[in-house]
Image (cartoon, rainbow, N blue to C red):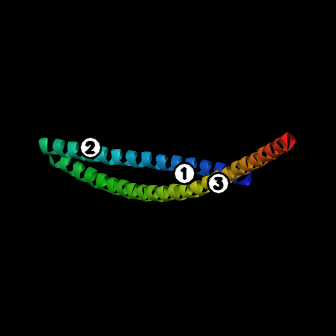
Amino acid sequence: MSAIEQLVRLHRWRLEEERRKMAELQRLAERLADQIKTLDESVEREAAATKEHQTLELSRAFAAFADLARLRREKLVRSQADVILRIDQARESVLEIYRELEKYEQAHKTREERKQAEVRRRDRIREDEIGMDQHRRRR
């Protein structure tokens, strides 16, 4: 295996690894969004229950719950923003690796085309020599 073929293989592997990493980050972002949605729904349910059974004790408990839920939501939103930033970085990395892979694949293709052209040139030269020998023998 030539060096350029090894580079192509290495970059294909790196590209797949980065794509897997990006997909994993995207799944994490989706899970965080789901957790935020679930938390918001939970707060809404508790608020509705508190309004329905208006008692001082329940109101205080809901206030404490709402404060904790707000803090949890802020943490989830920060985590989600961090994951989105990491997804963007992974996307840039995928694009960079893809561009490099394309360069190496093009170089490999060009090298193979040159080899094929050289083989065809040698075949033509050999065929021309055979033809010239046959022409000389007929004379």
Q: Residue at x 31, y 53 (%)?
A: 68
Crowd rating for badge 1 (residues with CA inside 10 Å; few <14, some 14–19, many 20+)? some
Picture quadrant where residue 45 is located: top left
Looking at the rendered structure, the kind of residue marked 2 is Ser
Q: Secondary structure at mark 2?
A: helix
Instruction: Say which label, 1 or 2, has the lower sequence index.
Output: 1
Residue farthest to the right, as pictured? 137
Question: What number is the disc on residue 18?
Answer: 1
Query: In the visual, does 5 lie left or right of 62?
Result: right
Q: Is residue 84 above or below residue 54?
A: below
Q: Nearer the observer, disc 1 or disc 3?
A: 3
Query: In the visual, does 124 lie left or right of 137?
Result: left
**Pointers 1 and 3 in contact (C-beta within 8 Å):** no
Question: What number is the disc on residue 56?
Answer: none
Q: Which residue is mark 2?
A: 42
Looking at the rendered structure, the kind of residue marked 1 is Glu
Question: x, y percentage for residue 13?
Answer: 61, 48
Q: CA distance from mark 2 to mark 3?
A: 61 Å
* Relative depth, front residue between 24 and 61: 24
Q: Residue at x 64, y 56 (%)?
A: 107
Query: In the visual, does 68 lie left or right of 87?
Result: left
Residue farthest to the front, as pictured? 139
Question: What number is the disc on residue 110?
Answer: 3
